[in-house]
């Protein structure tokens, strides 16, 4: 019916009386609605692709002249011919009401993708931060989130453990188009268009969630929470859904003549056997910071942040000897001077020696001196974690003084000791399920969202960022027992979800991955200023003010490195649960990508491999090295996957796969299904055979159903 409204508008411009009569009859019919949640599946959304080259057959719009602040011509045209010599394009109108043809300079056009169109996505890396050793990478993807979700159906279908989104609240505000400007505030179809926008994305998100056990979380306010609840029931009829009321602004947002709003709502959609994890965090009556239960935390013995190099604290540079097979500490050596050659220290038979060496190979230091560690070892305060399969090093943690005091005071029960002599401790405060009303002081968006962002980004502004601790507490209910969970946020805004996932990893030594999806829209006021200067989307001086480049990427980089975009150490400390200086950063890796739109034939003929390569790496777990180029020898193998492009080298390829410890996927490029099946049978157990490019093309070669 929304298509009818567009046609009626066109009819009015041609014949006003005929258009008015049609409009009158349409309004009568539109009142005859069946029972239930009903809304129009409006004409599909469109996204402009300013950096995409113009190609024959593309849908395009004509841009407004530089310096204009007007919205510009919204009509769609199709490119029929491109004249390379004159750099002109011949266009024909796609409007039903007219059959116009024009010629326009290529630089005055922008490619447009409708959401009914089939796309072939790729990714281009725009930078990375590596501080986490061999841990998997968090991903930040700049692109239209509907199209990125489509891309993720190839890399993460059925694999996502939790989705957390803070979608547009449909208030009509224009602080950032990303947040609230999908629909104009005075649009008669305001609610309907918002529902259509959400439904498209949630239907794809459903394909990504693990059908056996996963959770979808959505935050919303009073504007759309009723409709959103019904929409969730329609899309996820088999799921269990709960709504939580969370106080995020105790001071209240004034509303003339009405109650001041202090809360928002959080929908939890539990898929399969998913249930909230019991935690020690109190959610109701939690205004007093002291009421928050602090779980036992085993901290890394390897020092990070400031004063963490060998020359900084000489007495904390010494060897630790462990049993090679079990990791049990056999002895602790004495500290050595700055000029001591560590290669001269030889372990005994069956031992290995560990020095405080950072992941980049530099000499660091331990958190405590050798004498202190010997005492800690005797007290059971030293814990051996997992062994890195690549480096052979064991993770060594220790119980910090604050928690040791709780053990001594018997606030935390000592249950016993493990085979290495490490204390087995109780929870301290009995875990419990959260409640459906949250009144946590730490969830204040002003105090722990806006203020924190200013510290991280040196004063850069983003409207209404979530409290870091609110997102952290929410995710803890979902993935506390999943240390390798994959968490997706496709309305990531300032990047709070990625930040919260890193906090959770630090608290329990997890390797959870976040995937953050945002676009690079510029705030409305800034758009006007930039247009007046003659700039357009796609220009470098325009894009640097966009959400992704100005807020999301710098925040993720800042929280990992502990430094602001200007290179200064971040001031202030993290609070609640895990308190430490922000300048210490996190032992995490992250890579930033921009979504691209590829041509089917280029993909099929190996001409777009460099843009497809990041998708193959993401599908294989987003860890370790990536194959960015086609192998000259016909095959190559990296940490978690391999690529075979020449079937005649299959034997060498399979031999190399058998020597890969963390192998997940073998990508095989062939048009011959029989040869593919023959090679697939020879792969190591547990390796997933994937046929390129048949698997990629078939994943996207379907109608979007608009």
Image: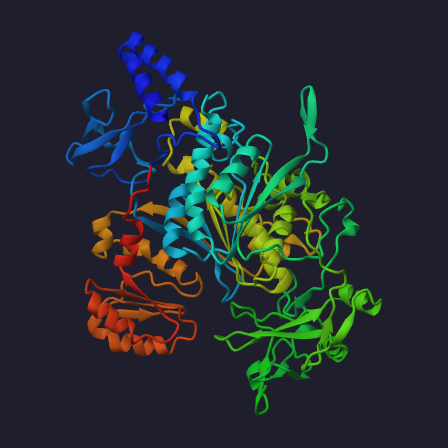
- The vertical placement of 323 against 555, above or below, is below
Drawn side of residue 92 relative to residue 177, left or right: left
Where is residue 39 drawn, in percent x and y? 44, 30
Give the quarter of the figure containing the C terminus: top left
**Can residue 195 be seen from the camera position used here?**
yes
Q: Residue at x 79, y 69 (%)?
A: 413
The colour scheme applied to this rendered structure is rainbow
Viewer-side residue, 209 vs 498: 209
Residue lying at the far right in this picture: please name it: 409
Instruction: Tell me if 121 is positioned left or right of 197 in this view.
Output: left
Query: What residue do we see at 35% from left, 76% from top?
Result: 684
Which of the 4 image quarters holds residue 423? bottom right
**Residue located 62% across and 67% down the image:** 309
Can residue 65 be seen by looking at this rendering?
no
Q: Residue at x 63, y 80 (%)?
A: 319
User: Is the N terminus in the top left, top right, bottom left or bottom right quadrant?
Assistant: top left
Q: Residue furthest top?
A: 17
- 139 versus 641 height, above or below: above
Q: Name the spot of residue 267 as percent of width and height, x first.
A: 58, 43
């Amino acid at each position: 019916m929304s298509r009818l409204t567009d046609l009626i508008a066109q009819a009015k411009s041609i014949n006003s009386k005929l258009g008015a009569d049609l409009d009158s009859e349409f309004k009568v019919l539109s009142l005859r609605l069946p029972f239930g949640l009903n809304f129009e599946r409006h004409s599909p959304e469109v996204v402009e692709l300013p950096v995409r080259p113009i190609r024959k057959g593309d849908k395009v719009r004509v841009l407004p002249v530089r310096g204009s602040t007007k919205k510009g011509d919204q009509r769609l045209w199709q490119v029929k011919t491109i004249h390379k010599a004159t750099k002109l394009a011949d266009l024909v109108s796609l409007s039903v009401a007219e059959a116009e043809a024009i010629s326009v300079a290529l630089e005055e056009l922008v490619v447009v993708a409708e959401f009914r169109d089939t796309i072939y996505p790729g990714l281009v890396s725009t930078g990375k931060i590596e501080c986490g050793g061999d841990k998997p990478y968090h991903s930040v993807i700049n692109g239209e989130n509907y199209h990125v979700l489509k891309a993720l159906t190839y890399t993460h279908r059925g694999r996502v453990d939790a989705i957390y989104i803070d979608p547009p609240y449909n208030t009509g505000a224009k602080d950032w188009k990303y947040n609230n400007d999908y629909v104009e505030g005075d649009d008669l179809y305001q609610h309907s268009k918002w529902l259509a926008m959400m439904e498209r994305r949630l239907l794809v998100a459903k394909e990504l969630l693990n059908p056996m056990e996963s959770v979808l979380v959505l935050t919303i306010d009073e504007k759309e929470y009723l409709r959103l609840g019904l929409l969730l029931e329609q899309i996820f009829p088999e799921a269990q859904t709960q709504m939580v009321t969370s106080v995020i602004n105790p001071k209240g947002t004034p509303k003339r003549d009405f109650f001041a709003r202090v809360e928002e709502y959080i929908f939890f959609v539990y898929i399969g056997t998913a249930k909230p994890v019991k935690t020690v965090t109190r959610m109701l009556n939690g205004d007093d910071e002291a009421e928050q239960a602090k779980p036992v935390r085993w901290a890394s013995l390897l020092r990070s942040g400031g004063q963490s190099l060998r020359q900084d604290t000489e007495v904390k540079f010494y060897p630790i000897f462990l049993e090679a097979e079990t990791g049990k500490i056999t002895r602790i050596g004495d500290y050595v001077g700055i000029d001591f050659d560590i290669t001269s220290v030889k372990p005994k038979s069956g031992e290995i020696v560990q020095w405080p060496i950072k992941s980049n190979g530099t000499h660091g230091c331990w958190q405590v001196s050798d004498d202190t560690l010997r005492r800690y070892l005797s007290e059971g305060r030293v814990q051996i974690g997992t062994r890195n399969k690549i480096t052979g090093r064991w993770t060594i943690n220790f119980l910090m003084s604050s928690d040791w005091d709780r053990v001594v005071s018997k606030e935390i029960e000592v249950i016993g000791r493990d085979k290495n002599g490490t204390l087995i401790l109780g929870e301290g405060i009995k875990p419990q399920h959260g409640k459906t009303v949250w009144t946590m002081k730490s969830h204040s968006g002003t105090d722990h969202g806006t203020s924190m962002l200013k510290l991280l980004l040196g004063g850069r502004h983003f409207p209404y960022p979530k409290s870091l601790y609110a997102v952290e507490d929410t995710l803890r209910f979902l993935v506390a027992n999943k240390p390798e969970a994959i968490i997706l946020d496709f309305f990531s805004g300032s990047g709070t979800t990625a930040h919260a996932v890193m906090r959770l990893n630090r608290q329990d030594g997890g390797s959870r991955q976040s995937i953050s999806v945002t676009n690079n829209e510029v705030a409305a006021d800034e758009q006007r200023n930039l247009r007046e200067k003659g700039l357009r989307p796609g220009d470098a001086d325009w894009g640097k003010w966009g959400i992704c480049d100005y807020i999301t990427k710098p925040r993720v980089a800042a929280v990992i490195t502990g430094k602001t975009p200007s290179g200064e150490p971040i001031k202030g400390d993290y609070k609640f649960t895990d308190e430490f200086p922000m300048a210490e950063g996190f032992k995490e890796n992250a890579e930033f990508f921009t979504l691209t739109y590829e041509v089917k034939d280029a993909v099929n003929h190996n001409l777009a491999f460099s843009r497809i390569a990041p998708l193959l790496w993401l599908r294989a777990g987003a860890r370790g090295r990536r194959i960015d180029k086609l192998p000259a020898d016909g095959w190559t193998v990296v940490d978690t996957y391999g690529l075979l492009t020449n079937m005649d080298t299959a034997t060498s390829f399979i031999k190399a796969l058998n020597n890969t410890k963390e192998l997940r996927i073998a990508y095989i490029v062939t048009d011959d299904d029989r040869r593919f099946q023959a090679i697939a049978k020879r792969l190591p157990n547990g390796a997933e055979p994937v046929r390129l490019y048949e698997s990629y093309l078939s994943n996207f070669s379907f109608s979007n159903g608009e």
